Amino acid sequence: MTAEISIRGVTRRFGAQAALDGVDLDVRPGELLALLGPSGSGKTTLLRIIAGLEWPDSGTVMFGGQDAMERHVRERGVGFVFQHYALFRHMTVFENVAFGLRVRPRAQRLPRAEIARRVHTLLNLVQLDWLADRYPNQLSGGQRQRVALARALAIEPRVLLLDEPFGALDAKVRKELRRWLRSLHENVKVTSVFVTHDQEEALELADRVVVMANGRIEQVGTPAEVYCTPASAFVHEFLGDTNRLECRVEGGRALLADGTPIGRAEDIMGSAIAYVRPHDVTLAPAADGPGIIRHVHAVGPLAQLVVELGGVEIDVAIPADSWARLGAGRGDRVAVTVQAGTLFPQRATRG
Ligand code: ATP
């Protein structure tokens, strides 16, 4: 499959600092790709280079197999939605969405009736046709971003670029818009690149997630791949709740400081860091068990506990019914089974 966008060896420096450092990435036709990483990791710079708003110091950008480096933003067929990309305040919702179609060169311009038809189709798509005559200041933040999206789609872009489009909205609206954008994308299937620093947003929305740190790509994969098989300690820590446990590896087994085994470790020797998700720890009744329940928060479908094991405290999340069956409380001892999903060597050699 030819990549829609192909990025090779892209580096961008600002002074001594590399905002992007040798980035290679393929964006597949029709996918929704999330660029995920902490502040300053280079997400926006990469998006701007794809757009043609920023130029790399070295490396190449191809669109549909053709060199895009000579093509400026207007020639790349990209639609944008930014966090604070204000709509034109003096134009109605209808006029905002129609704008990109009205300013086309005369030869490419559609007849008036065709523009109106297309704008209404788009406003229906973003479920805002009933607000066509309102002005932006008469809309909620979420409605404004949906208009911005309709406006970006109006020119039938080859690629849609979204930079934290829901970043300024409150948590509840963000969540709604996230689901809504996902189903919109299923409908229109336009190749989309989405910047976010919110791991939940990336995991829920994207077909594939690109995890970035310090101007480099740490991992590219489906949400399940990056979450369940993180390629580095950074990816593991960045994607969701995790316990970071120091351990030593002996005879292929990872052991906590007091000797409690927490899983297999075939290819590591010496000391290691084990990353364990709270829901990968299970507890069983045992009056002389090695674990001691130190804290309990059992409201809702998950019981969240802190269990002391081998001198370290471990966050544990178990279903509320398992917690009820356990019949234990604060200060009680329990047997603990830890499935250390991923181990990374620490000052150790891989054997
Ligand atoms: P955020 O989530 O905070 O927007 P980001 O991952 O999008 O962060 P970038 O905005 O791409 O990161 O910035 C990457 C690095 O490059 C940062 O250290 C930033 O300070 C630097 N940088 C970006 N643009 C410029 C610029 N125009 N001038 C100088 N430094 C810049």
Image (tube, grey):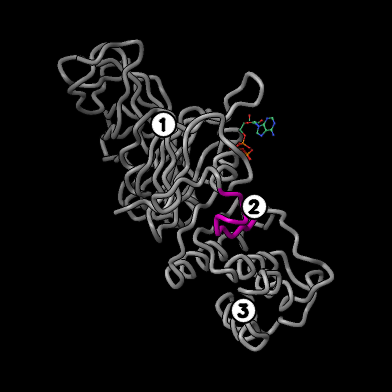
Magenta-highlighted residues = 71-81
Q: CA separation, marks 3 and 1?
A: 46 Å
Residue 119 drawn at (x, y percent): 63, 80
Q: Amino acid at mark 1?
A: Asn
Q: Amino acid at mark 3?
A: Leu
Q: Amino acid at mark 2?
A: Gly
The answer to which of 29 and 106 lies nearer the viewer is 106
Say if disc 3 is inside 8 Å of ligand 1: no
Q: Mark 3 and mark 2 in contact (Cβ < 8 Å)?
A: no
Q: Residue at x 58, y 75 (%)?
A: 126
Residue 40 drawn at (x, y percent): 61, 33
Q: Residue at x 71, y 78 (%)?
A: 94
Q: Residue at x 62, y 40 (%)?
A: 54
Q: Is residue 266 left or right of residue 244?
A: left
Q: Crowding at label 1, few (<14), some or many (≥20) Cα neighbours within 10 Å?
A: some
Residue 93 drawn at (x, y percent): 73, 75
For marks 2 and 3, the one nearer the N-term is 3
Is residue 286 in view?
yes
Which residue position holds label 2? 167
Please state which of the two labelled residues, at mark 2 or mark 3, is closer to the viewer.
Answer: 3
Q: Is residue 330 left or right of residue 145?
A: left
Residue most extreme to the front:
107
- Quadrant of the image occupied by residue 38: top right
Which residue position holds label 1? 243
Residue most extreme to the left:
251
Quick one: quadrant of the N terminus?
Answer: bottom left
Which residue position holds label 3? 123
Residue 15 drawn at (x, y percent): 66, 21
Kindly state the secondary structure of the residue where label 3 is placed: helix
For marks 3 and 1, the one nearer the N-term is 3
The answer to which of 103 and 333 lies nearer the viewer is 103
